[in-house]
Image (cartoon, rainbow, N blue to C red):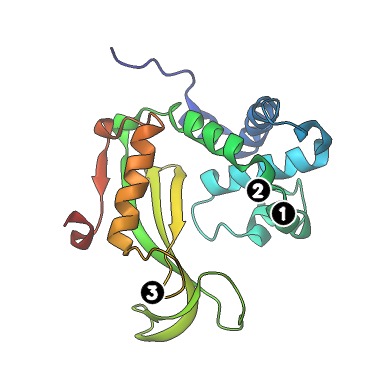
Amino acid sequence: MPRTRVCDIESLITLSPHAVIFLFRFLVGACTLQVKGAEMLGNRVLWGISTYLAGLVVLDRKRTATRIAKQFGFVSHDQLWRLGKLFGDIGLAINQWWINFLLCFDLTQGWFILDDVLIQKPYAKWIIGLYNQYDHTQNRHVMGIKLVVVLWTNGKVRVPVAFAIWHAKGFVPRYRTKNQIARLLIYKLIRCGIPLNESELVCDNWYAY
């Protein structure tokens, strides 16, 4: 039985990107009701979370804390950075809500994209997941963090649905290649109820083996 769309989120984003923040605020508020102690976060923090998630979905490029704060104006750059300390407490609830949000879209009109990305940290020294890695865009080795990411897009919005940090051999109890990590992410999405069969999965040839 085909799923029924609950809203036309694409039209809302096109009509008024700022309205998406209010939609996220409502959904994040409902999400945090399931988390013990979340009522202590306060209205300002919930607005910050809503603005950050809206920025990830709406902005077409450079989805950094600085640009999100400048584009929407609801919260400052520093407020967005401080949110990172809170995601550990409500991360699981937000993750489930994020999956439910994805199901608002017509998945047949988009693609799941699987790829790895290198976050450069040239001045960092002590960060978990930081290694000297080869950057193909610069044709040289740089210090950075490698992520394996799965996101869904229909060309208008981008919804990140899963990611994991790749670690080098000798730094984790059980080493996994990026290919193995990708398989675990896909397995996780299937277990969470995301119908991957409704969209095409796009990836490099290396992930197909």
Residue most extreme to the top = 1
Q: Earlier in the sequence, mark 2 or mark 3?
A: 2
Taking depth in this image into account, of 86 and 98 the one nearest to the observer is: 86
Kindly identify which residue carries mark 1.
85
Kind of element beneath mark 1: helix
Q: Position of residue 94 (x, y in %)?
A: 59, 37
Label 1 packing within 10 angstroms: few (<14), some (14-19), many (20+): few
Q: Residue at x 41, y 86 (%)?
A: 141
> Hey, what amino acid is under mark 1?
Lys
Q: Answer yes or no: do the residues labelled 2 and 3 have beta carbons within 8 Å?
A: no
Q: Position of residue 81 (x, y in %)?
A: 71, 58
Examine the rendered structure and indicate whether residue 200 appears above or below residue 29. below
Distance from disc 2 to disc 3, alpha carbons, whole Å, reads 26 Å
Q: Residue at x 65, y 48 (%)?
A: 88
Kindly identify which residue carries mark 3.
169
Distance from disc 2 to disc 1, alpha carbons, whole Å, reads 7 Å
The quadrant where residue 102 appears: top left
Q: Residue at x 54, y 38 (%)?
A: 95
Distance from disc 3 to disc 1, alpha carbons, whole Å, reads 28 Å
The C terminus lies in which quarter of the figure? bottom left
> Hey, what amino acid is under mark 2?
Gly
Q: Answer yes or no: do the residues labelled 2 and 1 have beta carbons within 8 Å?
A: yes
Kindly identify which residue carries mark 2.
88
Left or right: 140 with respect to 55?
A: left
| Count of numbered tags | 3
